[in-house]
Amino acid sequence: MEQVNETSVREFVFLGFSSLAGLQRLLFVVFLLVYLFTLGTNAIIISTIVLDRALHTPMYFFLAVLSCSETCYTFVIVPKMLVDLLAQKKIITFLGCAIQMFTFLFLGCSHSFLLAAMGYDRYVAICNPLRYALIMGPGVCGGLVAVACACGFTVAQIITSLVFRLPFHYSNQLHHFFCDISPVLKLASHHTHFNQIVIFMLCSLVLVIPLSLILVSYIRIISAILQFPSTVGKYKAFSTCASHLIVVTVHYGCASFIYLRPKSNYSSSQDALISVSYTILTPLFNPMIYTLRNKEFKSALHRVVGKTISQPQS
């Protein structure tokens, strides 16, 4: 009997959409269309930035990296979720769950620090326009992305190790549609206070540090904009920051709700709903927010499409 109780869980069963059994085929169609549109939109953004030399600036470099990151981010979760919506048994191996959590955390944490780098880019562009090209050179931009990825990798490795070193001997039914931290921790046979504190502190730092840097950048940006003599100049400056601010609000709002709550407030249904927003809807809206209001990008897209159409004729 003791040996049975000590049997380790070898796979997890997702129950994220089990309460919507009659709607799972409809959800599959809706999520598939949204996912394909997201992939297509991000592919257009990345290819346009790469092909049009007018967009070879730090701001669009960060936007291309952001689009690439969000494409990988959705690829970690959405394809498996789509398969599970049509499958009778929605399972993932223990190792597969650990890999999914690590990759998801790596991309999500890197995303947070990347948004901070984009905030710094806007600060330099508005507050030091004459030195912008010198300060935000290729080396600095590449270094900021590398630091963001290094921070994301380190945090993801530590949290994943802490979670999957815990014993899993009892239930393997995961009340979620992917391997997120709280649902997996809930299945552990027992927790250590140290693990919980470290995980909470790391999640807090990943959100608080980048958000603090963004707030400092925008305090200085707003101070500089208010000193502009013309109303038109103020409007243009604010418009260049509006898209970034919207994305920051959505990203940190969802992440704070999920990862900075007390454990007693954990709700699988609420978390699943919020998770759908930041794994499916947010990657769809972010590219649209950055490009639909951007005349420079739309002009570049028209040039790229025009060149592509005219090439076979020549």
Image (cartoon, rainbow, N blue to C red):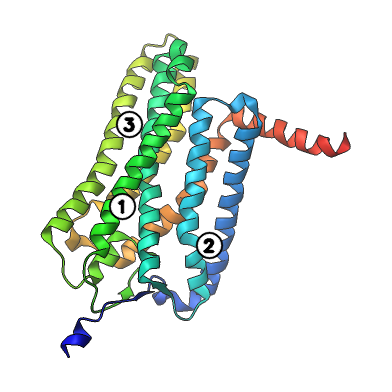
Sequence-wise first label, 1 or 2: 2
The residue wearing badge 3 is 214
Looking at the rendered image, the quarter that the C terminus falls into is top right
Can I make out residue 231 in this image?
no
Q: Nearer the viewer, mark 3 or mark 1?
A: 1
**Disc 2 target residue:** 31
- Callout 1–callout 2 Cβ contact below 8 Å: no
Q: CA distance from mark 3 to mark 2?
A: 32 Å
The nearer-to-camera label among 1 and 2 is 1
Disc 1 residue type (three-letter): Gln
- State the residue at coordinates (19%, 48%): 201
Mark 3 and mark 2 lie on one chain; the one further toward the N terminus is: 2
As helix, strand or loop, the secondary structure at mark 1 comes to helix
Q: How many marks?
A: 3
Question: Which numbered circle lies on residue 157?
Answer: 1
Extreme front residue here? 3
Which comes before the other along the chain, label 3 or label 1? Answer: 1
Estimate the spatial distance between the alpha carbons at disc 3 and disc 1, rounded to whole Å: 25 Å
Q: Nearer the viewer, residue 240 or 209?
A: 209
Above or below 194: residue 146: above
Q: Quadrant of the N terminus?
A: bottom left
Q: Quadrant of residue 142?
A: top left
Q: Residues within 10 Å of mark 3 (few under 14, many from 20)?
A: many
Label 2 residue SS: helix
Is residue 6 shown above or below 142?
below
User: Looking at the picture, how far across and down is residue 57, in whole percent?
Assistant: 54, 25
